[in-house]
Image (cartoon, grey):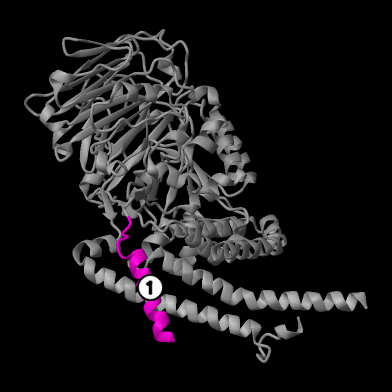
Amino acid sequence: MIGAIGNIILSFVIGILNIILIPLDLIVDSFIPSLSSAFGYVSNLIDTIISPISLYVLDTFMIPHEVIVLLFEFLIVKYTLPITVSGIRYALIWYHNLRI
Amino acid sequence: MKKILYLISSFVFFLVFSSNVNANKVYSVRLNYDTFSQVLESDSRYSTIIDYINNKLRNSGYYYYIESMRGNYNECNNSNKTQAEYNNYCDLEYAQSHGGYRLRVIIINPSYYSNDNPDTRTNDIPGFYFFINGGPLITNASQSGWFTFAPVGFSFGSDTDSDDTKLIRQPYDMPNGHTTHIIEFNSVNDLSNLDSWLNNPVFDNGGANFYHEVGYSRDNLGLLDYNPFNANFTPMFIYKNFRSECKYAYWLSTRYNTYFELYKNNMTYYKGGTVHTFKIDSDPEFIMSDSSIPIDEPIINNLGDDNFQISSSQILISHSSALSTINCPLNTEFNNNFCYTNNSNYSIDSDIITGNIFLTFDFGNGNTNVPYLSDNFYLFTFRTDSSIDLDISHIFIYSGLSSNSRVPIRINKFSYGAYTDYQVLFKSPSGSTSWSVNRVAIRLNSINSSNLSSFYLGIYNKYTYKQVGTSEPSLSDLNNFYNNNSIDTTDNSSSSWFTGFHINDRGLSSIITAPFRYFRYIINSNGVCSSLTLPTYYFGNIQLPCVQAIIYSKIPDIVILYRVIMSGLICYYVIVGYYKLAMVCFNPTDSRIEVVDL
């Protein structure tokens, strides 16, 4: 359950960031194509790192994967739940104000 | 309360994780550190220039080659430059940002070759010479005509001693005074310079500018020794310019049939260099890719898929150390220690005294009516040890075989004595339906079986490769080899590794979201650690097994204890954290989140 929530939160954040950054990416791609390519290469490098290599590195700590996942999910919830709650709160406030 | 939580969590994780040590998998690791060439190939402006040059020169009778450089060649070679200036002038991106492309074509006066015809040489064995790790492959004297030979990839030593110059053994050292002409292209506008020169071709005297040093660094070898058996293999050259300290001068080649003449250089000022000159055939077929360019996409497609269909004349021949159990491949027959087929002619022989192995590829013995003599090219790959397949690969291509198409190759046992397996890959990508030549004879009985645990000879095409393995392939393996038309079905883990390696068009957002993607990857992964395989030149594939597995095999009790303690601590931290989080969310007096207003 928590894992699913974590996945949803991460996907949501990634999607939001992608949407926000699309205009900037398009600008860079249009006017500075070489820089866009450079971003692509850096991204490729990151993708390479986010791979079994990262699992290899984590393995050196000899901590069970499930524990690491539990920790990561907790961190996700910890740092996103208050923001989420606040966001809902403000949304409700706006809603009430609009009704008035 | 905290102690109870700690004890409970420790106990739970002890039960769950104490005996779980993940099994190893093998992955190949290769970082794409050669972005420079991708910039070149992905930039249509370069392609425009290269195609223009090729169209102008490939049938002109001139010897030429194209090279690209980082930055301005002349400026880059100016020793008076400061390091900063040098970096600028030698940097392609700098050149690009300033509107420059830094390509140049080196045209060689063909009159030079009129005085140095390989056909007329008497004091050397006409042929070509490759070496792998210092040991040359030498042809015998039966080769005649120009060396219709186009190497696409080598394995060189990482040092710069004399071995590295033995790419081609040649008795005639390239004279210093032969004439060349160099046209540099810093922009598309410079293309007119080529036209102007062709209208009045005058060669410059005394230039030796086209000499190149084969100064391959060890890092580059990782690119050169790329697995040729999957779709992403990247035949290429990477040359250092012998004069400059430029890191790379990328050889883009011509993508066409190329006659290669390679000379061992003995010029005193020239350190460890090998000189290459080229002659372009009038029948363009040969392609050469720069590094990191998947050959199946930007390059091969230029030639059309029809050129890369597998033909019906495929053969697969295997040899095991037990000669008595030879199984001839499909469509072949075993007779008197020979496997025969009706497709092409191979022979494998060995020198009983020296132990050298001879591979002879006989393509018709002068039958000029055989279409493949000009239409096909062939890829042979020697693999000396299946466990280090990425490092000792040796790839070269025949193109436009002459009428006397007997092409023998000798593998020097001295060079390969340390290895046990050989593989030869035969490529006929032209897909010519009319390709039907003499029978193949693979002589197996004279091979020194003690030095060969397996032998593999098969036709390679763009989309089909099935590594049978080091043991005798079964009939089903052979059938799979013939029927497997999808590169995706290859079970080579390294190929899958590179499958998703692509340029992300949304690079910036991808970078920013990288931490989140990392979290998501970890959460969704199975947590199985995989051994890292690092291909090296001299030591084969270095496998880095997972640390936990190693330590666990040595001190399992301590590992379990460590994991229990660490798991307990983390679990404790998480549980307490969730508890605090819940208290924060539902505590109306907490000022951080005023959830009470909800």
Which residue sits furthest left? B353
In the image, the segment drawn in magenta is B1-22
Image coordinates for residue B239, horizontal then vertical, percent: 38, 47
Q: Is residue B359 above or below residue A33?
A: above
Instruction: Give the x, y percent position of residue B533.
Output: 32, 52
Tell me residue B577's x, y (percent).
51, 80
Magenta-highlighted stretch: main secondary structure?
helix
Quadrant of the frame with the N terminus of chain B: bottom left
Which residue was labeled with disc 1?
B567
Q: Residue furthest right?
A: A100
The residue under the point 18% across, 39% down is: B419
Q: Nearer the viewer, residue B390 or B547?
A: B547
Q: Nearer the viewer, residue B453 or B508?
A: B453
Indicate the quadrant where residue B532 lies.
Answer: bottom left
Q: Residue at x 88, y 79 (%)?
A: A97
**In the rendered structure, does residue B551 fall within the stretch colored magenta?**
no
| Left or right: B157 in relation to B28 | left
Residue B80 visible somewhere in the drawing: no
Q: Secondary structure at mark 1?
A: helix
